[in-house]
Amino acid sequence: MIDSMEPATTTRFAFAARELAEAARSLGLVVPGFRSPPRLVGADRTLRTRGGRATVAVRVRGRPWVPVLSDMIEGVVAANHLIGPGAARTREALWSAVGAGWVGQRPATQAAEIVSIEPKVA
């Protein structure tokens, strides 16, 4: 089981990004890119779309691991415009892919606000 207060690291972030990408592909979803930190100062998570590609940026430094992982999973859900039961099933599958021992024990994933940064079209 994952300790909910365990600190996040960039190594864990990179590993989780690969696992989430593989799981999203296997579900037939669009696989967003992952980066850290967000460009928007003060944001824990942002979603940027450009040219049909999505990038989920998550602040890792100074945060516990579980909220970082939750932001990554929510980023995949948001990048695929999922809502309702489809979103719930996707969350379960993604938590299962990255959190062995977490299914049924993970914190409730809330529909947290995602800051979307769209490119300005001139």
Image: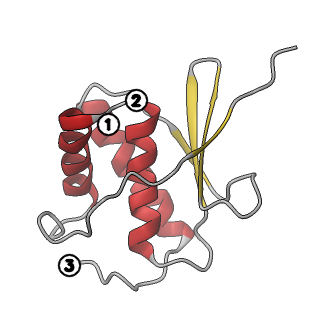
Q: Residue at x 70, y 30 (%)?
A: 118
Residue 74: percent from the left, percent from the top? 40, 49
- Is 68 left, or right, of 54 in this rendering? left
Q: Position of residue 117 (x, y in %)?
A: 69, 37
| CA neighbours of label 2 inside 10 A, class few (<14), some (14 to 19), many (20+) | some
What residue is at 14 percent from the left and 63 percent from the top? Answer: 103
Residue 1 image label: 3
What quarter of the picture does the C terminus occupy? top right
Crowd rating for badge 1 (residues with CA inside 10 Å; few <14, some 14–19, many 20+): many
Type of amino acid at the residue the image marks with label 3: Met
Q: Of the two numbered discs 2 and 1 on the same chain, state the one appearing first in sequence.
A: 1
The label number, if any, that marks residue 24 in the structure image: 1
**Pointers 1 and 3 in contact (CB under 8 A)?**
no
With respect to residue 103, does 29 lie above or below?
above
Relative to 38, 96 lies left or right: left
Could you tell me how far apart the alpha carbons at marks 1 and 3 are, in whole angstroms? 22 Å
Q: Residues within 10 Å of mark 3 (few under 14, many from 20)?
A: few
The amino acid type, in three-letter code, at marker 1 is: Ala
Quarter where residue 1 is shown: bottom left
Q: CA distance from mark 3 to mark 2?
A: 28 Å
Q: Is residue 101 left or right of residue 57?
A: left
Mark positioned earlier in the residue sequence (3 or 2):
3
In this view of the protein, which residue sits in the foreground, 113 or 29? Answer: 113
SS at circle 2: loop
Q: Which mark is residue 13?
A: none
- Residue named by callout 2: 80
* Relative image position of residue 67 (x, y in whole percent): 43, 68
> Residue drawn 40% across and 27% down?
30
Mark 2 and mark 1 residues within 8 Å of each other at the beta carbon: yes
